[in-house]
Amino acid sequence: SIEAPMPGLILEINVKVGQAVNEEDPLLILEAMKMENVIFSPRDGIIKSISVNKGEAVEKNQLLIEFE
């Protein structure tokens, strides 16, 4: 699973549930302190669930994406 590394705002989600991703694929963009942070896939896998929506504010360590 991927958790938010810092509090911020979800600007963009680049994947869908069921999508296969490769290591280092960009999954989403998290804006924190006026900077855009691209969250990359830590490994190859399939997206099991996405726990956030575009425009949503998230807290540090909040679950963002789960892998199968």
Image (spheres, rainbow, N blue to C red):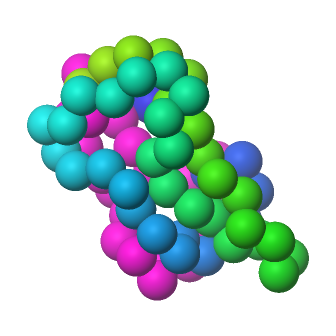
Left or right: 16 as drawn, with respect to 4: left
Q: Residue at x 24, y 28 (%)?
A: 20
Q: Is residue 8 visible?
A: no
Q: Say which quarter of the image contains residue 46.
A: top left
Left or right: 35 as drawn, with respect to 59: right
Q: Position of residue 65 (x, y in %)?
A: 39, 43
Left or right: 40 as drawn, with respect to 34: left
The answer to whether 51 is drawn above or below residue 66 in the figure is below
State the quadrant of the C terminus.
top left
The answer to whether 51 is drawn above or below residue 46 in the figure is below
| Nearer to us in this view, 26 or 30 | 26
Q: Residue at x 14, y 37 (%)?
A: 18
**Membership of 60 in magenta stretch:** yes
Q: Residue at x 49, y 21 (%)?
A: 23
The answer to whether 14 is drawn above or below residue 18 in the figure is below
**Membership of 1 in magenta stretch:** no
Q: Position of residue 22 (x, y in %)?
A: 40, 22
Q: Position of residue 41 (x, y in %)?
A: 51, 31
Q: Position of residue 44 (x, y in %)?
A: 39, 16
Q: Say which quarter of the image contains residue 13.
A: bottom left
Which residue is at the far top?
44
Which range is magenta?
Answer: 47-68
Q: Is residue 65 visible?
A: yes
Marker count (numbered): 0
State the quadrant of the N terminus.
top left
Q: Residue at x 83, y 81 (%)?
A: 34
Which residue is at the far left?
18
Left or right: 62 as drawn, with respect to 49: right
